[in-house]
Amino acid sequence: MMQLDTQFFDYEGPEEPELMIPEGWEDRAPAGWEWETLWEAVETGDHIYTDERVREAISLNIDPRVILDDGLFPGFNLQADRFSAQVIFIPEMLISARAMKAGLALIRPLLAAQAEKPVGTFVIGTVLGDMHDIGQSIVTIMLENAGFNVINLGTDVHPDRFIETAQKESADLVGFSALLSTTVYYQKVTIEEFLNAGHRDKVKILVGGAPTTQDWADECGADGWGKDAVDAVKLALKLVETPRAAWN
Amino acid sequence: MSNKIAVTFARLSQRNEAKSVQVARNITILDAARQAGVDIEATCGLRGRCRSCRVKIIKGDMPPPTVQDAVQLGHDEVLEGFRLSCQTRMLGDTTVMPMPPKAEEGHKILAAHDSKADTSVLHLDSGIKKILVQSDTPVEEHHQTSDVEEILSSIPDLKSTEVALRCIRKIPLELRKQNGVLTITGFNGDIIDIEAGDTTDHSYGVAFDIGTTSVVATLLDLQTGEQLASAGGVNAQAVYGGDLMSRIAYAQFDTKKLTTLRAKIINQVNEYIRQCCSAANVNPDHVYKIVIVGNTCMHHIFLGIDVSYLGLAPYAPVVRENLVIPAEELPLKAAPNAQVCMLPIIAGFVGADTVACILSTRIHESDDIRVLVDIGTNGEVVMGSREWLTACSAPAGPALEGAQIRDGMRGAVGAVEKVEVKDDFVCSTIGDVPAIGICGSGLIDAAARLIDQQLMDANGNFRKHDLDELPTDIRKRLIVSEHGHREFVLVWGEEGGKTNAVGITQGDIRQLQLAKSAIYSGIRLLQSVMNISDDEIEQLMLCGGFGNYINMESAKTIRLLPGLSNEHISYVGNAALLGAQMALLSEAERQNAYEITQDIQHVALAARPDFQDIFVDSMTFMGSRFPTSARSSRRKKKNQRQKHVV
């Protein structure tokens, strides 16, 4: 028999990410208010409850930034950390993202009204020939959470549309998603089109998607590759830290 | 230093020999294998994402491991000399042991005898007609005539005067062999063969189902409908990628590679025709009609049509119509006189195989709502009745065929195919031999038992809480693998590696969830498009080689199939092959196939706004959720809140 006993006692396994409770949240909420059930709702992906609680919070005039930071992020970040640590997988991440999306939809217009300044503008889309958007929609939500102004062009996006949008919106970053081994080729094509249009040095380009690798990112001339959504957001934040002037 | 190196592939068994080849330095082991004519299966399409192509370096320069080697094989195997042949490049003379001795002998392919065209309901009308004529030979030099003209004038009710060059070449000899006694063979009025003597009793046809994974052929007597012989095996292209997309990606924008894939399947089809004819003692010259069904990609590759754009949105096929091609043009040399009929296609990912399934299950004539589900790498769902038919493709990926599952394998000898729980887990393998891996039906069973036993929750997480409550024998099966991932051991291995341990990892469960969700959401989406509830479904029919081995209850437990009662679910065998046989025996059916493709509504899943929600919903299993460890401490002080079911 295998050496069971040691492994058996090890079953608790690697350290798992824990919920990061925002410090001093009580001071930013009305007396008697609790966020805990909302953290759990976002974590478990209960989008109906999330919607209800966020509406309730808005009606009580809680600052939208506070709702986002104290109410929505903790549960979602916990899932993102677990996702990164491979404790959970795409299904739960998607379920959680759906709840996050429900909350964000209510908060976003309020944040815009407060003229919050985004950390950068990120144009994202799935390349020409590819209709899949599950991966990039997770990345979109995470980028929005991280404070990016994200312009999601959807799926089957022509290189010209990426370029036009990047120019019009003065995007800092552009991300190409490809979910099929038959469409990754268009990541390279799209980067070449940015070169031809003379806009390659005005943006940082990220690629991602199931069939992609760091090797592929290097080969097609991208500035970076994220192995998963969490990684992609970290990379994006790192890239915008470099002042744009330095890129030109 | 020479740029050439010598690579030797050690022999695997008595049956094959060691093969050596001189190759350029720095090419991958897999490329060298292909140059040497050694088949190594590469399921993930050369991306270093699976272990199928692993080999062992047994002599010579040990190539440095790549990152993918380390990830897929682990530290120990890399040290033992294992490498992924698609990733590793060789620097010097090397001797390599190809690895797949996960012996796939006895790979369960739906044998042809499981599906026979019910000729009682079929009007036999294959379009092949043979007539006996007594032809004159030209006698006088001043008669302005020819052999062909003499023969044509002897045929009553002549519809066409065109004679193929292939026939003309045979005429001088055939005409004079038996003093002008000739058998003329026509297909829908066109002359396709002329031969000496009376062979009117002999007309045969072959029906083919060319799947991404397996190819099956049956030889039928066109005059009686009787099945005479069959042949089948793994699609010879499988070494270039297990699933459809890797196959397309391989051949994309590269005509040479397309030709490679095409040659593989043409050879295989020729081989099966020979096998069938020889088994039934049939002269291959008397095979006049061949019907081929397959998914759009297999169809296109077989015909040598560029598949590059099939892999890109909007995934349009190059051609959809019924096609009839003389065998010599392809070339199918094994049946030189045959007309090859390609059944029509519905869409890029809903091919002629689906059309054939509809044909044989008669959904298009049904009064009640029926659902046809083909569970495969690229699954398809058809739903409806005579009033309205819809179809969609459900890209499940190769997980259900064992690919990208750590201990996964196809349904071959040694694969865990059934999992039961009494006091402890008990696994049965195909062939009742020690387990060497797990196949799709085993995976489905295992997942269902984990759910039954509350070892896994609806979201697919392994149990982490209250482990003490579990029986000891079951509890100790939950382990942490050397990579730090959770795993459930199904079969314990013996020390010294005499037998393998077979387990199911958290990652395997995730792959299973993605795969089964594709099928389940395909069904749900068509239900939503057609506004059909579960109660309205009269019959859900599973087809394809895989459906036979699935435990229906387990499939319902993991929500691969909707929870219909058993009398509403049936297994219909290799419906695609059956449909091909029907089109072989009846031209009316072949025409029906075309009508079906014109009437059916193809639903593109990804283009539907509600798809993502349905897909996410479909990823969960039956049962409830476990509290996560981080939450269990919090839940004590948590206020009760109304729980909404997701």
Image (spheres, helix red, strand yellow):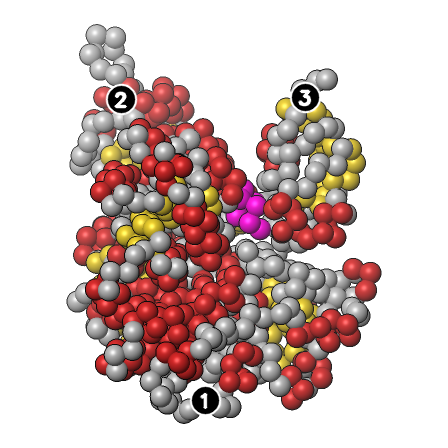
The lab-note entry on whether marks 3 and 1 share a chain reads yes
Which mark lies nearer to you, 3 or 2? 3
Q: Does residue B493 lie above or below A158 as drawn?
A: below
Residue B207 counted in the magenta span: no
- Badge 1 is on which residue? B638
> What label sits on residue B4 in the rendered view?
3
User: Which of these two is toward me, B53 or B330?
Assistant: B53
Tell me where residue A211 appears, x and y as whole percent.
46, 47
Distance from label 3 to label 2 (Cα)? Answer: 58 Å
Q: Secondary structure at mark 3?
A: strand
Q: Does residue A85 lie above or below B45 as drawn?
A: below
Residue A139, quarter of picture: bottom left
User: Which of these two is toward me, B494 or B416?
Assistant: B494
Residue at image position (73%, 76%) is A9
Please state which amino acid type lies under the numbered disc 1.
Lys
> What label sits on residue B148 in the rendered view?
2
Please state which amino acid type lies under the numbered disc 2.
Val
Residue at image position (51%, 65%) is A81
Q: Secondary structure at mark 1?
A: loop
Q: Residues within 10 Å of mark 1 (few under 14, many from 20)?
A: some
| Residues in magenta, as a range | B42-50
- What is the quadrant of the N terminus of chain A in the image? bottom right
User: First in sequence: mark 3 or mark 2?
Assistant: 3
Tell me where residue A209 appears, x and y as whole percent.
43, 50
Distance from label 2 to label 1 (Cα)? Answer: 94 Å
Tell me where residue A149 appears, x and y as whole percent.
30, 55
